[in-house]
Image (cartoon, grey):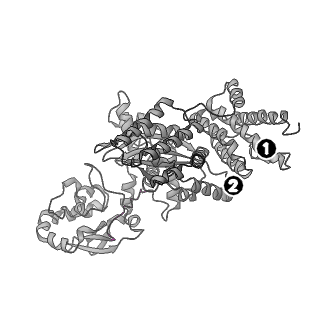
Amino acid sequence: MFDSLKKIGELKRNSSNNPDSSLPINRPKTKSKEMYLVIFDNDKKEVRFEKREITQNSFDEWKFIGNAKANKPMDRVTTDNLEYVIGFDKNGNLTRGNKMIINSAQSIPKIGDLLKKVDQWYDPSKWKQEKIEEWKKEGYFDGGLYSIVVIEGGKRHELAKFDEYTNYLLGSSQEVNSGVKCQVCGIKEALPNPKYPEGTMLKMYITDKKGFTSGITDSDEFRLKTHAVCNDCKNLMQLGESFVSNDLKARVGKLSVFIVPNLSPNSPAIILDRIKVDGRGWIVSINNIEKAEEEIMDEAEAKDYVYSVSMVWGDKQQSKFMVYKVNYDVTIPRLYEIKRTSEKIEKNLHIKELISAQNLDKNLDVLSLYALSPVKETSRGVIATPFLDVFSALMEGYSLDRRYIFSNFLQELKSIRMNTCQNALFKIPFESAVTLSTGFIMMFKILNVMESSKLELDAKEYVDKLGLSKGLKGVFLLGVVTASVGLAQYKKGDEKKAILDKIDFEGMDESDVKVYANRLMESLRNYGILECNEETLAEALSLINEDKKSLSSPQENVFWLLSGYSWKTLNFIKQGEIKG
């Protein structure tokens, strides 16, 4: 996931008005539409406020990246809390020393010199007595954003706009270990301590490593053994994580899910604007993904983009990121198949018509699945293991014990019947809950969550006989699907089968194989044969994602792709579909 976050960071940086900046700008939803520049005049020894309107660009202009969390020093000259600037809150409570910017930001080059002079004459306790009532009356405590300005020698210094401040936030002056490689880009300039922001997904990895690796201590030496990253990669990953947290997050009941798209090295920035994440449906909007795919196909002929998503279920806390579950590399075909199957079951079983008798408007989607799972929500958090287990099996395409799935539904149905649910979304009448549960059971059967794969048996048996690794089995199955496209082209009069021209006989690496898989899906859709090949394609991509290391030889990948194509084509010839 590091590579994915870095790629997102690169796209955001390159598409911004300031391509040189990798700052993870925070854009909170503030009630106030006003920001204040707090002016400390070293010449006159006075404090003034300058009101501005908060615009879409304000957070970028004044470099707001959020406040330092927990007990970390507040060394950021732009904040959304006036207390950190003036040293006391609207109730007159004085701020702790390390949370007052004038104290904590003195280590920043150039800025520190200006703030040290402010510190010589500005005393929070004195100014509180003299100004608190006036400043409350003027509404200064109710702003949505604050940034420090210092007047020195008649000159106005807007601290957030100093290059030294940007470099400080980016960690440009941090010492590096030139003998350790960055695990992301390979450059020999790893940071002894990347100091990821508290409460972010990046912090999750540091916590896990220190917590569960035997003999590892909290020191630079041992930290470099578990996680080594250079400053540029760190900043790009933080920028990518910030975008995911702000724009690709959804709530499902009491759970949060963060969507991390996995993109090819040459993906255009426009793809990020097309991904829509919602706590309804199946988290990621399929229509928007397909629209994005069509646009990219037109603009870049699909060669520059690979697409799947990872779903991170977790919560941001003060000092760390609490992770519940991660669904890695959920592919487009799988998402499309889930959506199509849920809609098909709803229609065939007349589910919406039946539950409308109880004035209910529900779908077979993630919200209903959560509502019908034995989730326990308490003031201390949520226990959602049954829901996450079933959802993960659904997304990743593996089977669960039938008894476990039935037991989960029965447990929640009993709670609904007895009115003892601890699930905020359970408000579904009993009869409708049973009907929706029935729909999910049928859906799970079709999608192989409860039964073995419905993949064409002879193809599965044949590829098993070859003794291939999982990844290469997936490549072979892509060849099987390729043959179906070839058959459709043959029936249209194309005896040479143009789909074969998309295969690079010189070799195809993992990225090329995934790009080809997306082209293949588009061809299946164009020829109207997606539905009958969807499961095989999804199975192929699932196997590839489970075992990417097996795709290390570009030439071997092409060989097994052609092997699968030839095996299926010969079967078509034997069946009389194609002339030999």
Residue at 59 percent across and 49 percent down: it is 347
Q: Residue furthest front?
A: 357
State the residue position of label 1: 486
**Which range is magenta?**
23-33
Q: Is residue 314 left or right of residue 552?
A: left
Callout 2, which amino acid?
A: Glu
Q: Nearer the viewer, residue 175 or 415?
A: 415
Q: Is residue 128 left or right of residue 469?
A: left
Q: Dot 2: what SS?
A: loop
Q: Dot 1: what SS?
A: helix
State the residue position of label 2: 301
Q: Magenta includes 524?
A: no
Give the CA separation, mark 1 to mark 2.
19 Å
Q: Residues within 10 Å of mark 2 (few under 14, many from 20)?
A: few
Residue at 66 percent across and 38 percent down: it is 536
For discs 1 and 2, the disc positioned in front in the rendered view: 1
Q: Magenta includes 26?
A: yes
Q: Nearer the viewer, residue 149 or 206?
A: 206
